[in-house]
Amino acid sequence: MKHGIFRHIFALALAASCSGAFAAPIDDAKKLYADGDYAAAIEQLQALLKKSPRDGNVNYYLGASLMAVGQTDEALAPLRQAQTRGVADASRLLAQYAIDRYDVEEAETELDKWEAQLKKSRKPVPEEHAEMSSRVVQLSNMMDRVEKIEVIDSISCDAATFFQAYRLSSEAGKILPGDAVRRIGAGSDTQTLSAAYLPESRTEVLWAQTGEDGKYQLYGADILDDGTISHPAPLGDQLAEGGNALFPFLMPDGVTLYFANDGENSLGGYDIFMTRRTAGDDGPEYFQPQNVGMPYNSPFNDYLLAIDEASGLGWWATDRNAEPGKVTVYVFIPSEVRVNAAPDDPNLHDLARLSDITLTQKPGTDYKSLLASRLPEKAENGADDSSSPRFELDNGRGTVYTRLSDFKNSGARSAMLEALGVEAELRKQLDREEALRERWRKGDRSVSQDILESEQTTAQMRRRAAAMRNNAVRLETK
């Protein structure tokens, strides 16, 4: 009996020793996972799995690491094993996998399992569960309205310069890099600007810039006769829907605006939205944005939808199925009237996910020739030097400045920009004044007082503009 007790104590000590030895490699693997070194974590976890193939934590972190590097199919087996061992987060990742595959029923099942496991272990159900449940409902609604479009090309591009793949004609305007907008006075040196849109009319510009909270918000401004922008202002907080809003594109009708946001009505990451605007007392007013649905949007990032009515082509960018640092730009043929795929279409999921763009195409159509015939010879995107403001200002040291980028001092640049804005308003005021004088010359003496008041206003505006120019010189040379 005594020997039996000693054997039992020795067995417990050995088990504790083995457990301690096994815990350290798991902790190391967890740290590698937390640090984002997924490849090293996978290698270590696969070695641990050979020693303990049913261990819940090992299987979970292996599945999570595989998912993080895009090996989602290989992640399923370890995640399901972890799920059977009671690891609740495995159900969360399996639900996300189902969402990414547009499998509504499977996603609902996995979310139910996740909730049940959390409650069984008396853990609170996180807010993420409600967010994912809402996303599944949205996914289900989108699957009922998958638009039928012809996708005629897909282009793999660097994420930083993807918009250069958009071959817009002059009628469709230009997509500009953020620094091109900064040259005409948008944003400050501390703000990050995204790609901007300049319509064919060159009378306004739309862009996105970060605020104090680090989030992107859409901005717009009129472009004045001298190339400067007048009173840049946000388009409206509601467009971001609590997230970020960027990549605007305004249709030639001047009313329909496409943009991207990652707010509460996004399926995942950035989604493409559409809104319309109307004239308001203080400038354009924008209606509540609407998610444009599938196949444009996905649980990943989708953005910058642009439609060129002159060529009959459209573009948008996405990082679904893309390598890190890359995006896919899809080229499609827009329809005047939206037509949705039938809910019982056997290819519905593939059409929604765009897993094979040939499924969207008409048999026997030579899309390569069609694309070549519709594309303009030269893309209209890129830096836009023509929109950079030009003026003349002697800096007091023998050098004449002709554009805002000549200024070294940001305060002087802002003062000059303000002066140019006043001068542009002065020109409009002088036009109104001349119209009043013309009425007076034709015998309308009722405008006499209006002319006198206008003369006083123009004199004040001249003094203001001169003072601002002098201030710009003072700040630049101090």
Image (cartoon, rainbow, N blue to C red):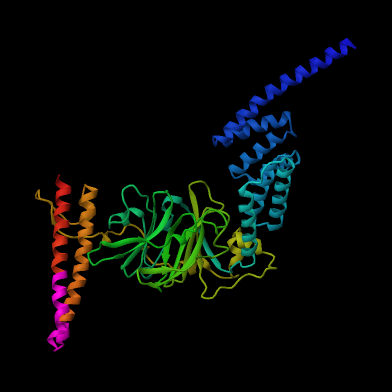
Q: Nearer the viewer, residue 287 or 70?
A: 287
Residue at 56 percent of width and 64 percent of height: 293
Is residue 296 rendered magenta in the image?
no
Residue at 64 percent of width and 57 percent of height: 136
* For residue 373, side relative to residue 43 (left or right): left
Q: Position of residue 345 (x, y in %)?
A: 68, 67
Q: Nearer the viewer, residue 296 or 217?
A: 217
Residue at 51 percent of width and 62 percent of height: 153
Task: Tell me the quarter of the image containing the C terminus.
Answer: top left
* For residue 218, side relative to residue 422 (left or right): right
Task: Tell me the quarter of the image containing the N terminus.
Answer: top right
Q: Position of residue 436 (x, y in %)?
A: 17, 81
Q: Is residue 263 above or below residue 370?
A: above
Q: Position of residue 266 (x, y in %)?
A: 55, 58
Q: Nearer the viewer, residue 445 or 295?
A: 445
For the question of whether residue 166 can be seen, the reply is no
For the question of whether residue 392 can be seen, the reply is yes
Query: Most extreme residue toward the right, as rendered?
Result: 1
Span highlighted in magenta in the image: 437-457
Main SS, magenta residues: helix
Is residue 440 rendered magenta in the image?
yes
Q: Is residue 72 above or below residue 152?
A: above
